[in-house]
Amino acid sequence: MTDDDRRWRTAPAGAGAASSRVRAARLAAGLFLLASLTVLLTIGFLPPPVDRSRMLVTSAVCAVTAVVLVLLPWRRLPQRATVLPLLWAYLCIGGLVGAYAGQLSHYLPFYGLAALYAGLTQRPRYPLVLAPVTLASPLLALAGAEKTDHLVDLLGAALLSVVVGEVLARVVQRSDEASRAAHALLDGVTALHEARTEDAAADILAELASTLLDPDAALVMLTAPSGSTHYYTNRAQRGFDGPLGELVIDTNEVSGIGLAVSEGRALFVPDARDSPLVDQASAARLALASVLFVPVPGDNGYLGCLVIGWQTRKAAVDPFGEQVVGVLSTQAGAVLQRLRSVGRLRVQATTDPLTGLANRRVFLDAMDRLRPGGAVIFIDLDHFKRLNDSQGHAAGDEVLGAFGAALRASVRDGDCAARYGGEEFALVLPSAASVDMTHAARVVVDRLRARWTGPVTFSVGIATHQAGDPPSVTLARADDAVYEAKARGRNTLVVAPVALPALDHA
């Protein structure tokens, strides 16, 4: 998997946490400023016993707090520092407004502002952890100027603040998780469409499933680009402690993949330990309790299946998970279908359809890259026209196909073996340091002779590429060597002589 394929998963977590602290501070500053204005606007409506000068002090304290919160270096402070504005708010509510200025009962909405801040900035359960501090706030007020007959109202407001803060925190967390998942899905699908190979697409699909559904294991099973679609092979995985080797699933047998593909829908197995649809050896190895099979559709049937497993038993897949797997399967199917279509076109453009070898254009491209010391091999089937005339072109095509298979099995990795035209074949062997390429060419021909048991023999010409010669000269020398081999009685090999450099005479 390339760096480009992994880029969608890179996220500056530290920068995001710092930004969240700054946002929390700005929210707290805004709420304190709102509280300050509320105090100023309501002073004239309070009963005469209220000490208005103390209320002005309370308003000023809230305003100064707002300024201080904006100026503090929140990017350098730890995340837990975001709880400090909340603690100070409860102290202001109980101490300043209640015990110091009096008439806290007129400012019960302040608990609503505290609940808003707690729900928007704190994790779930934090408002519950702070409940003792929240409930202590009205007790602090009652210890000062508040009347005891307001105790029930004040404690009720504080308790409601705790409940609202916790509920809002859970809602915000779920919203944040859904937002992050949506962004990850969008980025992942974009990376999926940019994948250049099937293996890269399968790896991104496995990573997406692992990121978005939080399973303990994810496996991408794909059919072969050509051949039977009943066999699915693992191409990417997550959550495994080591290489799995090649896994092959035959959908003609009872399996979760087979059932999901035959019914064309995602199949969830809540109890994998006792299900015949799940390979029990794999399930036991990974301690999987629940498994989800998601078919990946193609133009004509299904191209693969995404297998997702959890070690903790799940009763069902949540609705968001169902939407995610639907998007993943559809997008992955479109990408894999495109890659396979492009691959088929590439093969058709570069491969001889009868023999499976490279075509003449690929061979000429390899010749253009040939360096001094490399070798060119020309092969011509002997008396092939006689075979065609006596047994027909179908028999001739069969011989060509078999010879192409034998030639493919005889060459080294990196060699270019091509059908040059008709019954002529050509090979390019790139140069290698400290290697006699004429000898290497003879080894390839010996392998071919050992494998070839067809009804015709073949003649071979070998030429090594010389410095200063254009590729066309080397090609012509190999061609001349083949004709020399045929002139010597066929079924033989000739190495083209190396031309000596011309001498300059004064």
Image (cartoon, rainbow, N blue to C red):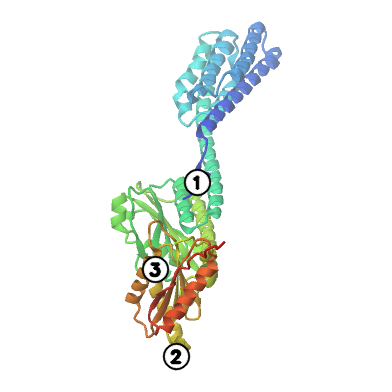
Please name whichever residue, 93 or 225, is drawn nearer the observer in this view of the structure.
225
Q: CA distance from mark 1 to mark 3?
A: 39 Å
User: Residue 192: horizontal and vertical position, in percent?
Assistant: 53, 53
Residues marked 2 and 3 touching at CB (< 8 Å): no
Q: Residue furthest bottom?
A: 390
- Could you tell me the amino acid type at mark 3? Ala
* Residue 196 in view here: yes
Q: Earlier in the sequence, mark 1 or mark 3?
A: 1
- Could you tell me the amino acid type at mark 1? Asp
* In this view, 101 is above or below 132: above
Q: Which mark is nearer the camera, 2 or 3?
A: 3
User: Residue 380: horizontal and vertical position, in percent?
Assistant: 45, 79
Q: Earlier in the sequence, mark 2 or mark 3?
A: 2
Numbered badge on residue 58: none
**Quarter that holds the C terminus:** bottom right
User: Residue 434: horizontal and vertical position, in percent?
Assistant: 38, 57
Q: CA distance from mark 2 to mark 1?
A: 56 Å
Circle 1 Cα neighbour tier, 10 Å, few/some/many (<14 / 14–19 / ≥20) = few
Indicate the secondary structure of the residue bearing disc 3: helix
Q: Which mark is nearer the camera, 2 or 1?
A: 2
Q: Earlier in the sequence, mark 2 or mark 1?
A: 1
Q: Which residue has dot 2 on it?
A: 386
* In this view, 369 is above or below 34: below
Q: CA distance from mark 2 to mark 3?
A: 28 Å
Circle 3 Cα neighbour tier, 10 Å, few/some/many (<14 / 14–19 / ≥20) = many
Q: Which mark is nearer the camera, 1 or 3?
A: 3
Indicate the secondary structure of the residue bearing disc 2: helix
- Could you tell me the amino acid type at mark 2? Arg
Numbered badge on residue 3: 1
User: Residue 489: horizontal and vertical position, in percent?
Assistant: 39, 85
Q: Which of the 4 quarters of the picture holds residue 505? A: bottom right
Numbered badge on residue 441: 3
